[in-house]
Image (cartoon, rainbow, N blue to C red):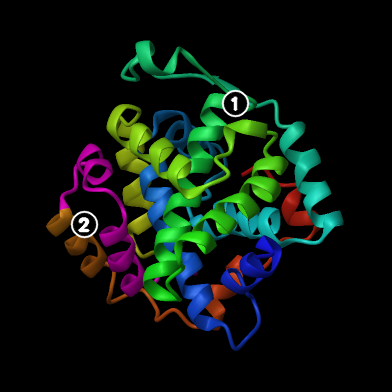
Amino acid sequence: MDPRNLLSDMYSTTPDAAAAQRATLTGGIAAMVTLLAYPPAAHLLWLRWQQTGYRPDPRPQLMSRWVTAVTGSPPQQQALRRLVAGDKRHAEFPPEVDRDRFGSRYQAGDPVHRAAAYAIVCTLMLAAQERMYRQLDAAERDAYCAGCAATAGSVLGLGRRAPSDYARLRASYETIVATRLQGTSFGRAALAAMLDGSPPTPLPATLIRQAAQLADDRALRHLGLGEAPARAAAHAVSSQAPSPDQSTLAHMERPGPEELSRPA
């Protein structure tokens, strides 16, 4: 089985692959919700919002780069690899962050944080695609993980830290969800900003509801949500959020050089 062909199918961006695109966006929403319960990622997203005014949004800030890392052309992947390698951002964590688990500072190149973010995104992307697009058998799941490790894992410089089979990926994800999440005021504020339904391009409420069902209940509880509140939050934006049409999915197209040059 060629992982490249499998990934090309699962991340297809052709107009007749709307189901795959909806699954990708749903997985991206679930992943960003979970990342907002992981303080190193949550603090980075919150800082970007405070400094630039750009609310957390999984489409330009997460999914466009993930799709490029997984299925982009070699020049696109190389450009993204250079961007990742050159990311030198760092910041002191607020006092509420558990220093014993996360240290006192965020460093963009920290392989532990990158590996945790990778496991969260890869796991929830696969879960969304299997629920909404098509189910994979055991061999395909392993091929999917191997393909993502060879592409996105390589772009992130993770090496062996990127699980190359499904059992290792699930084990990594379970460890993170069980021991590496923490609710924070900035994570909850960033989540509220992501879900508030403001124009010009609010997240589709239908996909928010599906993402809430994919995300682990433990992550939702760290953010002050349970299963029912998460669905209520999705309903709260439904009057403003559009259906997941091509205009919404367009945010997942692979970024050009200008987009890649912007900080995540």
Marks 2 and 1, how far apart at CA: 31 Å
Give the residue at x 42% y 72%: 135
Q: Secondary structure at mark 1?
A: helix
Residue 89 falls in image quadrant = top right
Q: Is residue 183 left or right of residue 34?
A: left
Q: Residue furthest right?
A: 75
Residue bearing the label numbered 1: 111
Query: Where's residue 36, x and y in %?
Result: 38, 41
- Estimate how packed mark 2 is, as few (under 14), some (14 to 19) or many (20 or more) residues with alpha carbons within 10 Å: many
The magenta-colored residue range is: 199-226
Q: Amino acid at mark 2?
A: Ala
Of circles 2 and 1, the one toward us is: 1
- Estimate how packed mark 1 is, as few (under 14), some (14 to 19) or many (20 or more) residues with alpha carbons within 10 Å: some
Residue bearing the label numbered 2: 230
Q: Amino acid at mark 1?
A: Pro
Q: Quadrant of the C terminus?
A: top right
Q: Looking at the image, is 116 positioned above or below residue 198?
A: above
Q: Looking at the image, is 19 positioned above or below residue 148?
A: below
Give the residue at x 67% y 56%: 70
Query: Where's residue 37, x and y in %?
Result: 34, 37
Q: Is residue 86 left or right of residue 5?
A: right
Counting every numbered tag in the picture gives 2
Q: Nearer the viewer, residue 161 or 195?
A: 161
Give the residue at x 35% y 28%: 180
Q: Quadrant of the N terminus?
A: bottom right
Question: Does the residue at mark 2 contact the one at mark 1 (Cβ under 8 Å)?
Answer: no
Q: Looking at the image, is 167 positioned above or below residue 206?
A: above
Residue 257 falls in image quadrant = bottom right
Q: Earlier in the sequence, mark 2 or mark 1?
A: 1
In this view of the protein, can residue 176 be seen by the observer? yes
Q: Residue furthest bottom?
A: 16
